[in-house]
Amino acid sequence: MPNPLKDHPNWLVVRDRALVPAGAWARNRRDWVVANDAVYTSFRRPGRPEQIAATVTLVLIALIVVFLMLFDWNWLRGPIGRWASAKYDREIVLQGDLDVKLFSWTPSAHVRRVRVGGPDWAKEKDTLAVEDALASVRLMPLLSGRIEMPLVQITRPEIVLISTADGRKSWMLDPDKPDTGPLRLPPINNLVIRDGKVFLDEQGRKIRLNATVNAREGTDGTAGFHLEGQGTINGTPLTLEVRGGPFINIKRNRPYGFKAELSGVGSRLVADGSITRPFDLGQFTATLSLEGRDLADLYLLTGITTPNTPRYRLSGKLTRDDTVFTFNDFSGRVGSSDLSGDLKVYKTGDRRQVEAQLYSRLLDIDDLASVLGGTPRVTPSGNTVVTSGVPGKLLPDAPLNVERLRVMDGTLTYRAGQVKRNELDVRRVNLGAQLKDGILNLDPVSFDFNRGELDGTARINATKKIPYTTADFRLRGYPLESIIPARNGAPTVTGRAIGRAKLEGSGASIHDFAANSKGTMSLVVPQGQMRAAFAELLGINVTAGLGKLLSGDTGTSEIRCAVADFTVSGGTATARTFVIDTTPVLAKGTGTIDLGAETMNLRIDGETKSPRLIRLWSPITISGPLTAPKVGIDGGAVAGQVGLGVVIGALINPLVALLPFVDPGLAKDANCGALISSAR
């Protein structure tokens, strides 16, 4: 940018002329102050009044200094205690000597026998009692607004921390003041704690801990910070140990290393790290290793709700940045599956928020079943299997802890790249969850099979004592040969199944939900193949069916369609449509499935489409538990058919006795399109 002054041919002369008026104004201003300002004149030539004022001021300062040097600070113990007691609504007493040294480059205060009582609801125990305390500060940094403490020495402190189930904390001097986050102390170059004791009573998670605290100087093995405690958590043993180096020459910009170990409720947590800025507990990093029998147990130690799992072992980087905790790049194993990911925990208002992104390279489906409420059990060979919790039952009956779902919000994503070989032939898993104000939305719930997939959503309302669940799941293209086992090396049935279950109901477990559910369930096979022997037996065609079965015939018949559509009410599924249409036989079924008792009682009547010589007019029955159903025939119907044949043969002709066993084959093909369309 051009400068008009420098563009002038004699710009130096112009500049000097411009500065002359400014210098002249300053000289004129100085001369006026010397001639007319009374304050300036009194300092230059003080008169008698000024001399008296200065003398009085100096005398007062000297008297104040002497007074402070000779002042007995014990006189202030009562007023300080009464003021603090009134302010914080609890008894605060300074019972011993109070000694303050102000005139030093490191002013200090020394107090003995300090007692801070508990709030009204916990008066029986003092929150703090200290036998002796000495603290000093550096004067020069203090004058500039910074606090630096060269020495803090505390002897026999006793601290009682009580936290009630409704959130009251005895150590909060001002309970109406919002929580300002982690403890932050000014830099302390030398901290000494002798024979300290800490008692914790956390009533919400049933934690009781008695700990000793010491911080010693020196170079021997006992020097450094050491906290060691023992107690109980939910009635089981609890131990805590924290170790750090000596608090000597601590600097704000030099991290302070520590190691902590916490064990309880079948879990063990070990942290090895450093506080980024000493005495600012809101900033630290550590390598965290944790292991135990069930991740759900960690709720009692951390307050974070997690699902039930098999044994676990995880390790990663734990970081705290004020109120935000992150557990990043962790990896390890849960049951027989690997697990890795990132976890973030923070607060929004009074609500704890959890964000988790989890991934497994290779998932054991039994481990996921235990998350859904199954009970993991280790076999003698060392393998983990999952049961419902009740012998002979299929649906898990482990109750959902609704109270834990109400204490936090969060989101979860989980993906398994591969799944170990399993009976259901699951290949990949993708899950998503969002928890907000006691309502858990599962979306998506996706399982990819070798062929086909299962996708769905679920909503669990846990705001009441018994949760209410709404679920909608769809099955697409699942192979029937994965459900019905092969016989003699050849598939019994082939085809792709399409299904849907749309249910809702109350219940604390999957079993209870099913037992109280209402809605619809349907399964459709648009087309497929069935062993011809079994297709004939659907109509109890003895000559064709048994002949093919006994001869080992592996020929197939077409399944034109199969539709099973059930209406569910009160946990009982009643067949609305139940049709299996094959080339030789049209079978229709009726009956119910009791989801609560996990039993079925179905009846299938088959009609042949072409004449058959010997056919038993008897329905096929499927009954018993879902885990081991029994297939048979209605003996009463067979007996009636045989009895009719005997009567006819006796009255007319033995050959005519075969007539009750002859099927003219009048059945027609089902309207598959209409049946499939009607399935819900």
Image: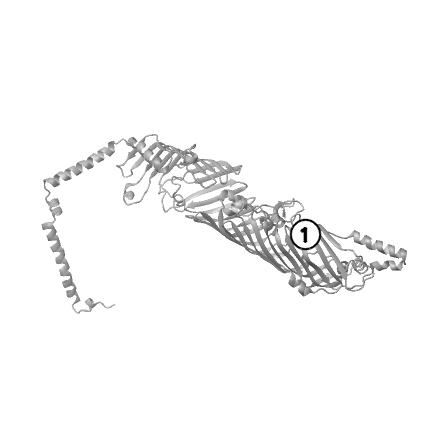
For the residue pair 250 and 611, the one nearer the viewer reads as: 611
Taking 131 as reference, is 643 left or right? right
Quarter holding residue 120: top left
Vertical side of 369 occupied by 449: above or below: below
Task: Decide: few, some or many residues near mark 1? Use Cα within 10 Å; few <14, some 14-19, many ≥20.
Answer: many
**Percent of width and height locating residue 614:** 82, 59
For the residue pair 378 and 510, the one nearer the viewer reads as: 510
Residue drawn 15% across the image and 61% down it? 19
**Percent of width and height locating residue 32:** 11, 52
Specify the quadrant that holds the N terminus: bottom left
Vertical side of 616 occupied by 116: above or below: above
**Percent of width and height locating residue 539:** 77, 59
For the residue pair 634 and 450, the one nearer the viewer reads as: 634
Residue drawn 55% across the image and 41% down it? 266
Residue drawn 14% across the image and 56% down it? 26
Q: Mark 1 points at which residue?
A: 593
**Percent of width and height locating residue 285:** 44, 47
Q: What residue type is labelled 1?
A: Ile
Taking 52 as reference, is 519 left or right? right
Residue drawn 10% across the image and 44% down it? 45
Specify the quadrant that holds the C terminus: bottom right
Q: Can residue 383 be seen in this view?
A: no
Q: Which residue lies furthest to the top in this view?
A: 96
